[in-house]
Image (cartoon, rainbow, N blue to C red):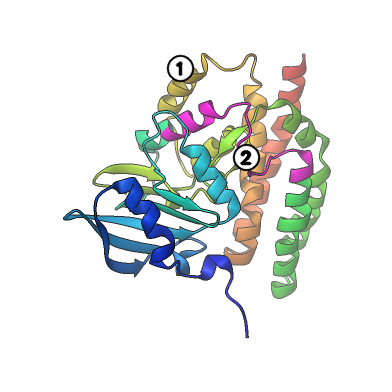
């Protein structure tokens, strides 16, 4: 008999409800349950309706990895970050407010609340390392390419026979050891990033917008989150850049901005190659690989200019 993983189980009310009751105050009772659609652990993510002293509210109860728990704890200390808000946390679960909304539609605009949240998180954790989160350095990058993404490409090649997957697997071997990437990872400042800031993780509703699902958070260049949004059509980063500069006093010094941009535009498409190989087909895999190669061709000159 197969055994469900921790992320596949429904969390009993008596595990999390006392902590939520203490946070919300008053008499809290459960009035309904429902499963949420979407996300990699959706089979176990619940919307739970509550009555809090006669007021109706809803929360999301979510089994979580240790990394996501660490990320949400790190977000909880960011000054003036209103969303997402942590209501209760355990070693492998989270309770958050239920945000009523739909994924962000196609187009160049990203809600100001999302840019503001990213700027506040990136600025707060710039140059610091939240506990319990992976750090994107040269060793991490090598493992990501060779141990996590390359097997997906090879497996897709075996299933389909399409030569694109073998070509990408070979490229991943080269990228894993590329001296330009390794050098850039050593000079670009790191912070806490979302790690998967695509439109599907931005909910837009009547009460505003929120960036959800921080399960891929890590300590990495801030530009990675920006690169993901730019790749999906975002064009105006003024809100982010203005607030980030205000919060950091212009940054920690002579930041290698062009190096960070190029590195992030290598990192972002490579990071999605495994998912694309499993779900999106050879054409999308080839497109992502080409994006990474283009950015990599720009990284060398950017590094040379920075080091002069």
- Residue tagged by mark 2? 131
What residue lies at 52% left-to-right and 26% top-to-bottom?
A: 123
**Alpha carbon separation for disc pair 2 and 1:** 26 Å
**Image-based side of 303 in relation to 215, left or right:** right
What residue lies at 75% left-to-right and 72% top-to-bottom?
A: 158
Number of other residues with Cα within 10 Å of mark 1, as a class: few under 14, some 14 to 19, many 20 or more: few
What residue lies at 62% left-to-right and 23% top-to-bottom?
A: 257
- Secondary structure state at the residue bearing disc 2: loop
Residue 230 in view: no
Q: Nearer the viewer, mark 2 or mark 1?
A: 2
Q: Give whichever of 248, 71 is nearer the camera.
A: 71
Q: Is residue 294 above or below residue 54?
A: above
Residue 237 in view: yes
Quadrant housing the N terminus: bottom right
- Residue tagged by mark 1? 246
Sequence-earlier tag: 2 or 1: 2
> Are the two marked residues, 2 and 1, in contact with CB atoms closer than 8 angstroms?
no
Number of other residues with Cα within 10 Å of mark 2, as a class: few under 14, some 14 to 19, many 20 or more: few
Quadrant housing the C terminus: top right
Q: Position of residue 25 (x, y in %)?
A: 28, 47
Q: Is residue 123 magenta?
A: yes
Q: Quadrant of residue 148?
A: bottom right
Q: Position of residue 28 (x, y in %)?
A: 26, 57
What residue lies at 39% left-to-right and 43% top-to-bottom?
A: 85
Q: Give whichever of 228, 15 is nearer the camera.
A: 15
Q: Which residues are magenta?
A: 117-140
Q: Position of residue 133 (x, y in %)?
A: 63, 43
**Image-based side of 117 in relation to 277, left or right:** left
Q: Position of residue 131 (x, y in %)?
A: 62, 40
Q: Is residue 109 magenta?
A: no
For residue 256, the mark is none
Q: Is residue 12 above or below residue 301?
A: below
């Amino acid at each position: 008999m197969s055994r469900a993983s921790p992320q596949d189980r429904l969390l009993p009310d008596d595990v999390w409800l006392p902590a939520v009751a203490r946070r919300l105050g008053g008499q809290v009772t459960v009035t309904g349950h429902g499963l949420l659609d979407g996300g990699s652990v959706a089979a176990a993510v619940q919307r739970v309706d509550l009555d809090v002293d006669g007021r109706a509210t809803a929360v999301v109860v979510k089994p979580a990895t240790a990394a996501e728990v660490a990320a949400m704890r790190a977000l909880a200390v960011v000054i003036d970050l209103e969303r997402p808000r942590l209501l209760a946390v355990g070693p492998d679960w989270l309770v958050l407010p239920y945000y009523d909304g739909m994924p962000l539609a196609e187009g160049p605009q990203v809600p100001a609340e999302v840019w503001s949240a990213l700027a506040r998180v990136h600025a707060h954790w710039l140059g610091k390392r939240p506990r319990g989160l992976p750090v994107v350095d040269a060793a991490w990058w090598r493992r990501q390419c060779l141990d996590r993404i390359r097997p997906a490409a090879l497996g897709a090649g075996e299933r389909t026979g399409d030569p694109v997957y073998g070509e990408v697997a070979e490229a991943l071997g080269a990228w894993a050891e590329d001296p330009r990437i390794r050098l850039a990872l050593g000079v670009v400042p790191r912070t806490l990033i979302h790690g998967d800031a695509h439109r599907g993780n931005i909910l837009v509703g009547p009460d505003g917008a929120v960036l959800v699902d921080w399960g891929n958070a890590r300590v990495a260049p801030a530009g990675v989150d920006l690169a993901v949004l730019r790749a999906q059509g975002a064009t105006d980063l003024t809100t982010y850049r203005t607030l980030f500069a205000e919060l950091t006093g212009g940054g920690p010094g002579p930041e290698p901005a062009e190096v960070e941009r190029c590195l992030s535009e290598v990192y972002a498409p490579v990071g999605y190659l495994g998912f694309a190989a499993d779900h999106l087909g050879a054409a999308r895999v080839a497109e992502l690989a080409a994006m990474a190669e283009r950015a990599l061709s720009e990284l060398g000159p950017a590094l040379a200019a920075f080091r002069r």
